[in-house]
Amino acid sequence: MSSSLEDEVFPSTPGKFKIERSHAMNRQFHRCFASTSTMFLWALFLIALTASYLSFQSFVDSSSRYFSASWGGIQWEKHVCNSAQIHRSGGMSVLITGAAGFVGSHVSLALKKRGDGVVGIDNFNSYYDPSLKEARRSLLKTHDIFIVEGDINDNRLLDKLFDTVAFTHVMHLAAQAGVRYAMENPHSYVHSNIAGLVTLLEVCKSANPQPSIVWASSSSVYGLNDNVPFSELHRTDQPASLYAATKKAGEEITHTYNHIYGLSITGLRFFTVYGPWGRPDMAYFSFTRNILQGKPITIYRGKNGIDLARDFTYIDDIVKGCLGSLDTSGKSTGSGGKKRGLAPYRIFNLGNTSPVTVPTLVNILERHLKTKAKKKVVDMPGNGDVPFTHANISSAGRELGYKPTTNLQSGLNKFVRWYLSYYGYNRGKPVN
Ligand SMILES: O=C(O)[C@H]1O[C@H](OP(=O)(O)OP(=O)(O)OC[C@H]2O[C@@H](n3ccc(=O)[nH]c3=O)[C@H](O)[C@@H]2O)[C@H](O)[C@@H](O)[C@H]1O
C-alpha cells in the first residue's frame, strides 16, 4: 500500500501504531479487494439479469402489440384501401388525423362527398366524452369512411398507412385542444401538438411521394397581440397559454420540415370554431347544456369590466377554408427524404371577421333555447385566456377563395337544433 493512500485513509499517525495499522490495512486491502471482485461478479450477474429481463419484456411487448394491435391484417388493409379510393377525376387521397374530432369529421365528410379518398386516424382519447367521437365515427362509416384507431405518435402505424396508400395530402387536425386545460395537463399538449406533429412530419418527409400537408394552428398564437384585426403579418411571439405556445411551436416546426425536406405546408389559424357535432368543452356547448339543465354558467369578464369577445367561426365556413387549402396546396418537392426544390409554406387566418362578446353569445343561446341562463359573472382568471380575437381574412380570401357566410345567430340556431336532436329533449329538461 502506498503511503499516500495510507495517508489518505489514516493521515499523519506516528510509530508502532502506524506499522500495526499498516498490517491491518493490508488485511483490509485484501478483504476489500476480495469483496470488490465479489461485488464485481455480483454486478455483472445483476447487469446480465436486468438485460435479459428487459429483452424478454420488449419481446413480450412487441409480440403483444403485434397480436393485440387494433390495426394491420388483410381485412384492415381492405378497409383502408376502400376508404382511400378516389371517385372523381383529379381527386386526392387524404389522410385525416383527428378524423373523429369536431373539425376532422366535418372535413372528412365534405371531401368524401365530392369524391375524394379519405382515411381517418384518431386515438379516441377521453379529453371529452368518447361516445360523441364514436357517434361521429358511425356517421362517417355510413359514408364509407374508415377511421383507424391509433395515435399519431405511433410511427409504425403511420408507416403502414403510407405503405398501404400513396396519400396525396395529409389534413392534420389531431391535437390536444382547449386553452385552459393546458394548466391541468400540460404534458398532453407536448405529447400531441409537438411530439405527435414531429412523428407525423418524419413519416411524411420519408414517404414517396411526399404528401402536401394542411394542418390546424390556432388564433391563440396571437396571444397578447392587441393590434386588431389580427393579420398573419403580426407578431406571434407572446403566447398567453401553453396551448398557444405548442401551436406556435408547430408553425416553427413545420417551417423547418418545409425548408429541409421540401414538404408543402399550409397552417390554418382557426378562430373559435363552433357548430353541430362540436366540442363539449367549448363555452357555447357547455353553456347550452347547463342552460337546458338549469345549472349556472360562469361568464368571464375582462379587465375594467370589459366583456370578452371572440371571432366565433361556423364549422361549414372552416370546412370550405380547409378544402380551399387542400386544393391550392401545391406539391411537396422532396423524395426519399431529400428536398428537390422549393415547396409552398403558407399560413392563413380562418375567422369570421366579426367578433361577438360572450354575454351576447349567451343572449343568442337563451333566445334559441327559450330558457334564461343562470349567469355568474366573474373576473377572468389568469388561465391563458385572451380578451378578444378578430381575424383579418383578406389573405385567405385572396388565395383560398375563403368567404365566411354564417353569422353567430344562424350558426347557433343550427347548433341548438343539432344539440336537441342528438341529446334529445328529455336530457335537456332542467334537473332538480
Ligand atoms: O381559436 C382558437 O384557437 C381556440 O378557440 C377555442 O378557445 P376559446 O376561444 O377560448 O373558446 P371557448 O373555450 O369556447 O371560450 C370562448 C369564450 O368564452 C369564455 N368562457 C369560457 C368558458 C367559461 O366557462 N366561461 C367563459 O366566459 C372564454 O373566456 C372565451 O372568451 C378552442 O377551445 C381552442 O381549442 C382553440 O381552438
Image (cartoon, rainbow, N blue to C red):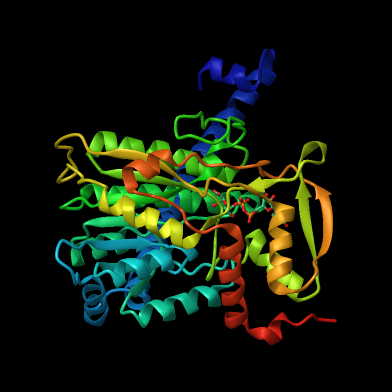
Q: Quadrant of residue 143?
A: bottom left
The picture places residue 328, in percent across and down from the top left corner, at: 26, 48
- Quadrant in which the C terminus appears: bottom right
Q: Residue furthest bottom?
A: 426
Q: Nearer the viewer, residue 342 or 127?
A: 342
User: What residue do we see at 26% from left, 65% from top?
Assistant: 161
Residue 127 visible within the image: no
Does residue 92 appear left or right of residue 197 in this picture? Answer: left
Does residue 173 appear left or right of residue 165 in this picture? Answer: right
Does residue 222 appear left or right of residue 401 in this picture? Answer: right
User: What residue do we see at 76% from left, 50% from top?
Assistant: 300
Q: Quadrant of residue 228?
A: top right
The picture places residue 334, in percent across and down from the top left corner, at: 17, 42
The picture places residue 165, in percent across and down from the top left corner, at: 20, 65
Q: Is residue 375 above or below residue 378?
A: below
User: What residue do we see at 49% from left, 37% from top?
Assistant: 33
Q: Is residue 400 above or below residue 65?
A: above
The picture places residue 278, in percent across and down from the top left corner, at: 55, 66
Numbered circles on residues, count: 0
Residue 378 visible within the image: yes
